[in-house]
């Protein structure tokens, strides 16, 4: 099943411990997804985990529930 881990670009920049977004914005990293290369959201994912609105535990629980519901775990 398709899982979309959703987070807006501003939050991604805030969470970037390696400074990759900053480097991409400065042009030091070419073809960086969401900055200098396009990103297309999936059209119909089975799960959307909105990490900017959910805790890590909430996000993990959504994924685990889906795995359990499908008999994967």
Image (tube, grey):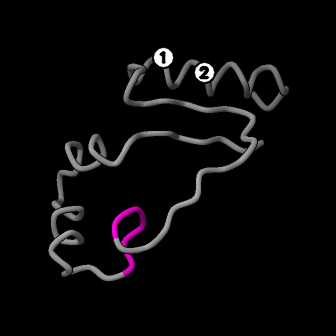
Disc 1 and disc 2 in contact, CB within 8 angstroms: yes
Residue shown at 19% from the left, 81% from the top: 28
Magenta-colored stretch includes residue 7: no
Residue 44 is left or right of residue 20, and the answer is right
Residue in view at x 73 percent, y 28 percent = 67
Q: Which mark is residue 48?
A: none
Question: Based on the displayed image, in which of its 4 quarters is residue 51 positioned?
Answer: top left
Rendering coords of residue 48 (x, y %): 61, 32
Q: Is residue 62 left or right of residue 72?
A: left
Q: Which residue is mark 2?
A: 62
Residue occupying the far right of the picture: 71
On screen, 49 above or below 38?
A: above
In the image, which residues are magenta?
Answer: 31-35
Disc 1: which residue: 58
Q: Position of residue 56 (x, y in %)?
A: 40, 24
Image vertical order of residue 31 relative to residue 6, above or below: below
The quarter of the picture where the C terminus appears is: top right
């Amino acid at each position: 099943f398709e899982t979309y881990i959703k987070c807006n670009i501003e939050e991604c920049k805030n969470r970037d411990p390696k400074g990759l977004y900053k480097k991409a914005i400065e042009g030091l990293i070419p073809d960086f997804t969401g900055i200098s290369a396009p990103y297309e959201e999936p059209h119909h994912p089975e799960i959307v985990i909105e990490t900017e609105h959910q805790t890590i535990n909430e996000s993990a629980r959504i994924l685990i529930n889906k795995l359990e519901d499908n008999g994967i775990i």
